[in-house]
Amino acid sequence: MINHSEGIFPSIGNLKLYYQGWLPKGTVKAILVIIHGLGGHSNKYRNIFEHLVPKQYGIYALDLRGHGRSPGRRGHIISWAEFREDVRAFLEFIQSQHPQSPIFLLGHSLGAVIVFDYVLHYAPAASTLNGVIALAPAIGKVGVSKFRLLLGRLLSRVWPSFTLNTGLDLTAASRDEKVLAAYTQDVLRHTVASARLATEYLAAVAWIDHHASDWQVPLLILHGSADRIALPEGSEMFYQLIAYPDKLRIEYPGAYHELQNDLNYQEVLADLEKWLEAHLGVISY
């Protein structure tokens, strides 16, 4: 049996962000916190909670500002620190609800970049995490045209809230036609990003790469070899920059961007569960 809950929690700027939780009946083995990607929301991870909650894991996922059911202009931030502080506030909220539970932090696509940035900025607090998982992290080259990125740079100073369709290819999300059909009907999903978000993202990636050698938390990276939205070479380069020994990267031949919803999602979730089980007693500090 899965106990589903939803609510709001306060983040910086007194913004009330939406979240969902899925808890098992009985003892909670550990908590997995999910941070979604650009244009996404907390509803996109059904396969993950349906797989892990019966194994006594609790799952929490938020809707980032400007996404899903949370307030804010769609696809816009003023500063990357807003995303970072949203994650910090969400983790503190969850830790207050489950003070004795091991906690893992999972980021998908842009969400993985947000997670990397949080962990490296808040090293003492992040060291209490049992581990970090990155699904298809958008840490290197992405499937956005150079023209759109250049336009974002030019407009960020003079018109930071100018929004533009990302131009990302929906068919690159998954090899499952049913998943793609569901995405086209998803009213919570959006495909826009502001000029300021684009430049803040590029600056965040550069900062993360520069500080990757400071990483001190167990890390699992899962990526599809045929990912055209977040190219797998980026996560491989980041992985090589990590000196911390407890790290693992798995690349799935032929898999697309939405690993949790691709044709091989059961293999992906089995690998995720195996890694979680091995790190239940691991704290990096």
Image (spheres, rainbow, N blue to C red):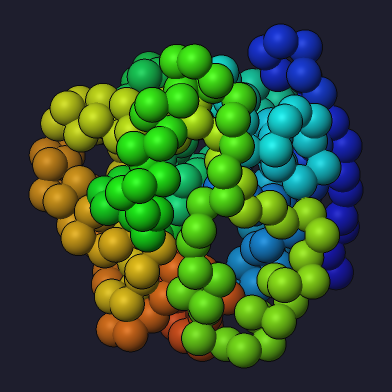
Image location (x, y in percent) of residue 67: 71, 41
**Quadrant location, the C terminus:** top left
Q: Can residue 234 be seen in this view?
A: yes
Q: In this view, does 187 lie above or below 265?
A: above
Residue ID at (77%, 40%)? 19
Task: Report whether 86 appears left or right of 168.
Answer: right
Residue ID at (40%, 19%)? 122
Residue ID at (36%, 54%)? 145
Which corner quadrant of the image does residue 3 belong to?
A: bottom right
- Name the one closer to the observer, 157 or 90: 157
Residue ID at (56%, 34%)? 194
**Quadrant location, the N terminus:** bottom right
Task: Report whether 16 appears left or right of 275.
Answer: right
Image location (x, y in percent) of residue 73: 72, 31
Q: Can residue 119 be seen in this view?
A: no
- Name the one closer to the observer, 198 or 205: 198
Figure label count: 0
Image location (x, y in percent) of residue 246: 22, 48
Which corner quadrant of the image does residue 184 belong to?
A: bottom right
Task: Report whether 36 appears left or right of 17.
Answer: left
- Name the one closer to the observer, 38 or 143: 143
Task: Report whether 34 appears left or right of 109.
Answer: right
- Name the one closer to the observer, 130 or 106: 106
